[in-house]
Image (cartoon, rainbow, N blue to C red):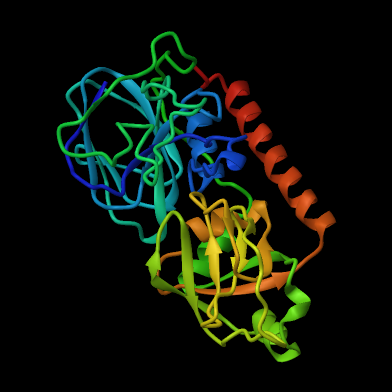
Amino acid sequence: MIEVLSSGAANLIQDLGRRGYLDNGLSRGGAMDSFALSVANAMVGNEPDEAGIEISLFPFRFRLAEDLDFAVAGADCPVRVENEPVAPWWGRSAKAGQTVIIEHPRRGARAYLAIGGGIDVEPVMGSRSTDLKASFGGMGGRGLKRGDTLKRRPGSSGSQRRTSGLGVVPSDLPSFWRELTAGHVIVRVLEGAEYRLFIASARKSFETSDYEITADANRVGYRLSGSPLSLETPVELLSHGIVPGTVQVPPSGQPIVQLAEANTCGGYPKIATVIEADLWKLAQAPVGCRIRFQITDIDTAVAALRQQAEELSRIRAALELTGHRG
């Protein structure tokens, strides 16, 4: 069990989300950076879809009420167990009574905390994720606050403790850190259904200019600022299905990227869709970061998603091989 020592409505219990409910108007939700959460779970011996904590308000502090394993992945955050530093993307054991502090990121926007066994909250529609819009899941549909106590799921995997720590470095991480340091992140997109309805100069601007993440950015989506994207002629569309990654363009011409808690339908023209394998980059891009969109094709998108899944499998296999998995 852990006790939360800091408040922050933006810090949420999340797993990999609820799938199969879009037709009921319920977004998938779940971790914004699902790869980071899956790796954090792997480092403590959990299955990829165990619930952890998505941290986007720092510092985040918690105290252990029992000996257990924990891991932090995602943003490049200084982490300390009492006064002992812990490397980024690292898992280790800690003892009852110790306090863990996850500080403000040097790079990135969201950190993911996994504890051995996963967090024990009641599933809703097959997921333990917090849905802020619907006000259910996690801790009663709200963010964590000071004094909350979170229990480890009894009898789950990852319940055995290690004595030594370990870390991982995903293959795309070093280059991504460099992009964040430069304040310029490239994400790949597929052409949207209305891509050809935009004027040629708008399509060129979309692919060759930068769009900055504005302060109007949350788990639902990011509003971007950059060269306006104009249509050939005004178009009225019936509301249609949208998903995380959909890039819509309202009348202002400034694009909106839908993210984890994306609306399930909308009527703005869709110029593109961020490929699923690159959504984690947007999750880690802070307000003020510049985004450059790169048009790709469906074969590349599928291959990138397959490579990401294969890398996660290799990471899990390596942890098992070294005997660190609980």
Locate residue 295 relative to residue 124 in the image: left or right: right
Residue depicted at x 42% and y 14%: 159
Locate residue 82 relative to residue 20 in the image: left or right: left
Q: Residue furthest bottom?
A: 201
Residue depicted at x 65% and y 27%: 317
Residue 209: image location, x then y, percent: 61, 84
Is 291 placed above or below 62 here?
Answer: below
Residue depicted at x 38% and y 32%: 137
154 or 92, nearer to the observer: 154
Q: Exactly how many numbered labels are in the figure?
A: 0
Locate residue 59 relative to residue 192 in the image: left or right: left
Locate residue 269 relative to residue 45 in the image: left or right: right
Residue 49: image location, x then y, percent: 53, 29
Looking at the rendered image, the quarter that the N terminus falls into is: top left
4 or 252, nearer to the observer: 252
Q: Residue furthest right?
A: 299
224 or 37, nearer to the observer: 224
Residue 213 picture quarter: bottom left
155 or 216, nearer to the observer: 216
Residue 306: image location, x then y, percent: 75, 43
Residue 77: image location, x then y, percent: 36, 52
Is 230 placed above or below 288 here?
Answer: below
Is 229 placed above or below 289 here?
Answer: below
Residue 97 picture quarter: top left
